[in-house]
Image: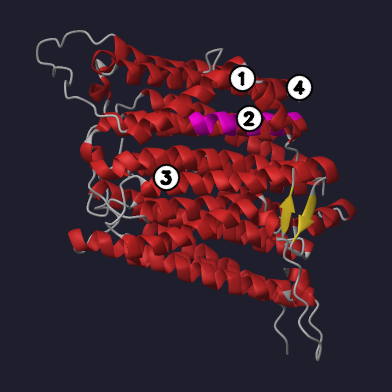
Amino acid sequence: MIAAVAQVQPGQPLQLPHVDWVTIGPAGIFFVGGLAMLLAGVFLRRRVPRGLWSGTTVVIAVLALWPAFHLWHQIASGGARTAIADAVVVDGFSIFIDVVIISAVVMAALLTDGYLRRENLEGTEFYVLMLFSASGGMLMASANDLIVVFLGLEILSIALYTLAGFQQRREGSQEAAIKYFVLGAFSSAFFLYGIALVYGSTGSTNLGVIADFLRTNSLTNGLLLGGFALLIVGLGFKVAAVPFHMWTPDVYQGSPTPATAFMAAVAKAAGFAALLRLFVSTFNTYRLDWQPIVWALAVLSLLVGSVLAVVQTDVKRMLAYSSIAHAGYVLVGFQTASNRGVAGALFYLFAYAFMIVGSFAVVTLVSGRGDTDASLDAFRGLSSRRPALAFVFTIFLLAQTGVPLTSGFLAKFYVISAAVEAHSYALAIIAMIAAVIAAFFYLRLIVVMYMAAPAAEGEEAAPTARIPIAVGAGMSLTIAVGFTLVVGFLPASVFDFARHATLLKL
Amino acid sequence: MTVPGAWFLTLAAILFVVGAVGLLVRRNVLVMFMCVELMLNAVNLTFVTFARMLDDIGGQVVVFFVLVVAAAEVVVGLGIIVAIFRRRAGATADDISLLRG
């Protein structure tokens, strides 16, 4: 992009860069599909069978897998490369994040169908916003220019602000939207200032040029380090790392639950994609400067997330704090700055996407019309009302705890073993302590579901209302629980995928 | 007489801090929103200054991207604010405190 501008000579025709559309295929299919659905929704409103939009979203997402597979094979044979005037990079890493985001979109879209019917909401907007947001996330994962990262971040975030406020008549949803918006815009400004400082100290926004510059010049001024710090602040907000986590519980609690599921999985994957690419790949030569910051963020996220989740009585808030702790585990992998750490972080993000969408899918069903009650009491005695639902939620909670034979155990195992290999023993021990603290509130929820004692005097009786399970939600839960268990038993293929999803060496 | 680039950078940094502090201390949602715009424009000034100092047009191109993104953000942000004010006229950031714990 920048190179294209520099080529303009007086009297010469404008030299446009060659656009290799396949390289942004997955994001492009999401974007075009979203636009098409938006138009179709206007013309076909109320004249289509229910479930069509959800199905269309799933089809678009699965279609996007095709260029992803195509590119994956291209990379396997021809190696990673940059495209479109070096603004975009095609490597295993970006394809991996694309696949994570596609999976999250499929599950969230299936879940949304039943939700919209229950809430009497019509139209395609929810799905379209989801597709746009996801395309922004994919753009972030494959960006090779700081400005492309910024554009991806904003496409992701602006659609998410709207999704958070989708229930525009509900005060909780409005509040979630305004809080997310103000803090999101605040963090974007920090991120952008970070880009400005990095640009000022290296003379380019292109990641390849920056990496070359940093290899050959050793900068000692504070400008570059200030830029690093601001970039970490901006992306730290997006991935909800402590101390930039304040918005997370409120936004997760107030948003429509399918939107929460979507943002928990996709915003985190995209934010970490950008963090890993910028710091592990581009700023690798300065890793002694940024590693301590990431170390501190990881420790804080692990401990604060786990400890504050213990005192929550609302399950959505509790899952929000637990997602902060999960960000801490990914940071543990990130902090090592090694290939193994990155592979562990990627595996974690993949496993986490399924666990968290599944968990929020259960919360969507249990909290009832209008997302009214997601308190611990609403889950009391769930095993007798809906044994299957209680069972799958148990699996998700055990996976988040890190119990063996689930994907969550291996995810934690890979990041912690990467930390041990990098001699970050203290961090590995803290991560394990945090896992023990976290086990308390996950197991408490399981106890509440299975061992509800008959209500004592003065206590409310356990709720008895029937919980309808929509077909789409059932499919979404099946996919999530299937992945969690199958990967728990047979992790080799997914871990190989993560191991081969290396960053392009700049 | 030419003004050295460092002055522009300092001015931009001051504007950025004014915006950031303003966002944290003001309670009117619209003013908080304006503070975000101030921060983004401080960054724009930084970009233009660096572009001039480095004699590289890239920094100026970036500003156009930022302007477009800021405009899109304004649209969504004002939409959210209008949705809130419809229900609660004159709400400040302190009134929007349903979610806590």
**Residues at discs 3 and 1 both on one chain:** yes
Q: Which residue is mark 4?
A: A421
Where residue A54 appears, as percent x and y from the top left, is 39, 45
> For the residue marked with disc 2, what is the amino acid?
Phe
Q: Secondary structure at mark 4?
A: helix
Q: Which residue is mark 2?
A: A347
Q: Which residue is mark 3?
A: A55
Between marks 3 and 4 in the image, the one whose residue lies nearer the viewer:
3
Whether the magenta-drawn stretch holds residue B82 is answered as no
| Residues at marks 3 and 4 touching, judged by CB atoms closer than 8 Å | no
Q: Nearer the viewer, residue A217 or B81?
A: B81
Q: Using the image, determine if residue A251 lies above or below residue A374.
A: below
Q: Residue at x 21, y 38 (%)?
A: A369
Q: Residue at x 74, y 70 (%)?
A: A2
Query: What residue range appears in magenta?
Result: A340-354
Q: Which residue is mark 1?
A: A410
Q: From this viewpoint, is residue A305 visible?
A: no
**Number of residues whose C-alpha sits closer than 10 Å to that of mark 2, classed few (under 14), some (14–19) or many (20 or more):** many
Badge 1: chain ID: A
Where residue A466 appears, as percent x and y from the top left, is 19, 24
**Residues at discs 4 and 2 both on one chain:** yes
* C-alpha distance separating marks 1 and 2: 9 Å
| Residues at marks 1 and 2 touching, judged by CB atoms closer than 8 Å | yes
* C-alpha distance separating marks 2 and 3: 28 Å
Badge 3: chain ID: A
> For the residue marked with disc 3, what is the amino acid?
Gly
| Residues at marks 3 and 1 touching, judged by CB atoms closer than 8 Å | no
First of labels 1, 4 by sequence position:
1
Q: Secondary structure at mark 1?
A: helix
**Residues at discs 2 and 3 both on one chain:** yes
First of labels 4, 2 by sequence position:
2
Q: Using the image, determine if residue A100 lies above or below residue A466.
A: below
